[in-house]
Amino acid sequence: MTSPQHITHWIAGRPWAGTAERRGDVYDPATGQVSGQVDLAAADVVDQAVGAALDAFGQWRHASVAKRTSVLFAFRELLNAHREDLAAIIVSEHGKVHSDALGEIARGLEVVEYACGIPHLLKGGFTEQASTGIDVYSLRQPLGPVAVISPFNFPAMVPMWFFPLAIAAGNTVVVKPSEKDPSAANFLAALWREAGLPDGVFNVVHGDKPAVDRLLEHPDIKAVSFVGSTPIARYVYETATRHGKRVQALGGAKNHMLVLPDADLDLAADAAVNAGYGAAGERCMAVSVLVAVDPVGDDLVERIRQRIAGLTVGPGSAPDSQMGPLVTGVHRDKVSSYLDAGVADGAELAVDGRKHPLSDAAADSGFWLGPTLFDRVRPGMSVYDDEIFGPVLSVVRVPTYDEGLALINANPYGNGTALFTNDGGAARRFQHEVEVGMVGINVPIPVPVAYYSFGGWKSSLFGDTHAYGEDGVRFFTRGKAVTQRWLDPSHGGINLGFPTHS
């Protein structure tokens, strides 16, 4: 048995050389064994990382847009070349299957590619002769050191929602990944260094609440991007704004998928299984509630039940695995507790994930829970009200579209939703009336492409801007308007060479 890997911080372009006062265990979810130990940062270590980011900001903010873009393109090529290596790290620490890890990287890569267009994204406006002899123009400038606090479920993609645009715009970054699966962030840091990013522009500190609190309070951190549960998102937002920071804090979700009687039920059943059980349900965009409009409830439940029976649950590294384990034993036990709670509340346990067979490659000590299906769920039951964040799908039955819509709009979360129908008029009405930030029409996981923006409504988002896209550019920059008048013409001298950028 190999000794656990030591995982430490990445500060000023290299691994931290200090000795941590505290460490946390990192597990291989497929075996339940400790695979690593991660240093947990105290406040002084966070200060070192922020100090490195502040020192690097003076140089990086003055780097030309052409220089920044060249580094971004180099990072893009390195990330693409090493995606298999990064996927293996994600599988080993998070537990998701290999194809899902590659998909996560691909979606993060989209944001990197969008950030490569930063010369266009930072263009301002210009008005000539706004007044006699006076021109007015606008520009956008970086903020300074910024913090990214990311969750365990997407250790590569979620940080990449934020740091490519932050860096492209001229900011420096301190990433605080989840201590449950910390190694992906260090791998990305090494790629940045190889791409030519100056030391200190991208830093990683590992830790738990003390590290988070120091980032939220640190006077040199100008903005905070966060993804996690709603209670913590609210805490991050309130704490960081109280300390004068710009904040985008993305919280939890309870995503509903409304299925109308005219929908293609095979398509809907496939979508419910894919979106409900992919990544073992550990997605903020997972479908956790299927709202079946009468009379399709019985048919849908049976089709989903049949599909669940054929799912292969096993280690993420096994080629035939379709669903892996949950990230930790504690989380698995919490999710599993909802099965008894749902039955106690009167829901029908149509498929018990505790009884789902595991593949031959699965170790008995892994953090396993198979796909679970509840039927005849109602608001007020814990399986409906809570964000379970596991492979638990609840079916709610309603008599009409209007009641299904009202159910969705009454929910305190507003992250993602989907409608399955062949009626264009119903689809148009739904996307207009539903009070949710991201809407799919016959698309179960409506995560926007990188040139739009990701974010929900209501208790799923705290702050004024969504992630990436145009909102991301605005979040990581400040606008400035310049009014100018020149009384005498200037002459730049003679240079017959072809103009170049540097």
Image (cartoon, rainbow, N blue to C red):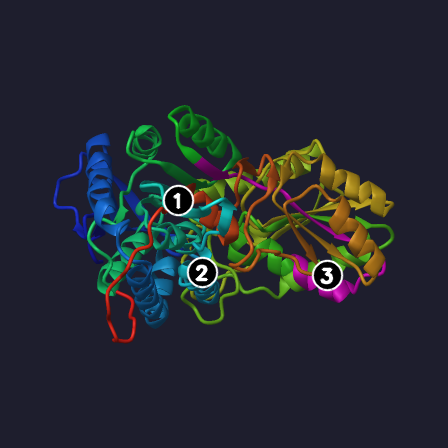
Query: What's the amino acid at mark 2?
Result: His
Query: What's the amino acid at mark 3?
Result: Ala
Determine whether label 2 and label 1 are within 8 Å by CB. Answer: no
Determine whether label 1 and label 3 are within 8 Å by CB. Answer: no
Is residue 281 toward the left or the right of residue 56 in the image?
Answer: right
Q: Residue furthest top?
A: 242
Q: Residue at horizontal 39%, vertical 44%?
A: 485
User: Residue 400 appears at what percent x and percent y?
Assistant: 86, 46
Is residue 177 toward the left or the right of residue 228 in the image?
Answer: left
User: Residue 381 appears at what percent x and percent y?
Assistant: 68, 33
Q: Residue at horizontal 48%, vertical 63%?
A: 100
Q: Is residue 99 visible?
A: yes
Q: What residue span does the magenta drawing correspond to?
A: 247-272
Nearest to viewer (mark 3 / mark 2)? 2
| In the image, residue 139 lies in the stretch drawn in magenta | no
**How many discs appear?**
3
Upstream in sequence: badge 1 or badge 3: 3
Residue under numbered circle 2? 120
Residue under numbered circle 3? 268
Residue 485 badge: 1
Upstream in sequence: badge 2 or badge 1: 2
Determine the image quadrant of residue 53: top left
Assign the N terminus to one quadrant of the image. Answer: bottom left
Q: Is residue 8 visible?
A: no
Is residue 412 toward the left or the right of residue 291 in the image?
Answer: left
Query: Real-space Cα distance between discs 1 and 3?
Result: 63 Å
Q: Observer-nearest residue: 438 or 9? A: 438
Above or below for 450 versus 176: below
Determine the image quadrant of residue 214: top left
Nearest to viewer (mark 1 / mark 3)? 1
